[in-house]
Image: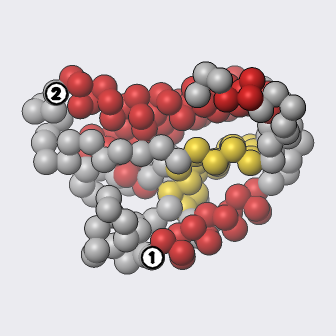
Amino acid sequence: MDALPSRLADVTLDLLYINAGISGPQDKPASKATAGEVGQLFLTNAVAPIRLAEAMRPRMNQQTGVIAFVSSILGSVEIGPGMGMPLYGASKAALNHLTRSFVEELGDTSLTVLSLHPGWVKTDMGGAEAPLDIETSTRGLAEQVTRAAGQGGHRFIDYQGEPLAW
C-alpha cells in the first residue's frame, strides 16, 4: 500500500472503492477474543481502509470523485446491536467513525464519500441462508456510486440507496 500512491502519481481516479473485511472471531464474545484477533480485525476493517483513502486522496478527481467504503448495517450503533457478529459490527462502527473523521478533515470539497452496506449476501461470510446474490448486491452498489458522483458530502446507505442510521 505504501508504494501505490507513487505508482499512480500520474493517474486521476474517479472512484476509489475500498472493500476490506474479515469476519474475525465469530465464535467468541469480545471477552474471549485475543488481543491479536481483535487487533487484526480492527486493523483490517477500520484502520487500513482509512489509511488507503488518506494516501489516495490526492489522486482523486476533486470535482466528481467518489471514495466508497464497504461498511455494514452491523456497524450502525443504532441498528446493528443484536443482529449478531458483535466484534465484526464494532469494527465496522469504528470504520464509520473514522470515515466521518476523514470527511471532516477534507474540508470544503466536492469529493463524495459513501459508506455502503452491500446487504446480506450469499458469500463465504454471509452464508447460504443470505437472501441476496452477489450480482444483485454489486449491481446495486455500482448504481449508488454512479448516482453519487459529483454530489459531494458523505452518506451511509445500502445497496438500494436507502439511508442507514449511523
The answer to whether residue 91 is above or below residue 151 is: above
Q: Amino acid at mark 2?
A: Thr
Task: Indicate whether 98 appears above or below 113.
Answer: above
Identify the residue at the far left of this view.
Answer: 32
Along the viewing direction, whichever of 60 and 96 lies nearer the viewer: 60
Residue named by callout 2: 34
Residue drawn at the location 54% of the way across and 35% of the way down: 49
Q: Secondary structure at mark 2?
A: loop
Disc number placed over residue 143 in the picture, else none: none
- The residue under the point 43% across, 75% down is 132
Residue 91 placement, left or right of 34? right
The amino acid type found where label 1 is placed reads Asp
Check disc 1 and report the residue beneath it: 133
Residues tagged 1 and 2 counted as in contact (Cβ below 8 A): no
Q: Badge 1, how many Cα within 10 Å: few under 14, some, many 20+? A: some
Tell me the element at label 1.
Answer: loop
How many marks do you count on the picture? 2
Residue occupying the point 64% across, 32% down: 53
> Where is 114 relative to 4, above or below?
below
Q: Nearer the viewer, residue 94 or 142?
A: 142
Distance, label 1 to label 2, CA atoms, is 33 Å
Residue lying at 80% horizontally and 54% vertically, measured from the top left: 149
Q: Position of residue 99 (x, y in %)?
A: 57, 34
Residue 12, picture quadrant: top right
Point out the tag, 1 or 2, that comes first from the N-terminus.
2
The quadrant in which the N terminus is found is: top right
| Residue 17, placed above or below residue 48 | below
Residue 11 falls left or right of residue 29: right
Q: Position of residue 29 (x, y in %)?
A: 14, 40
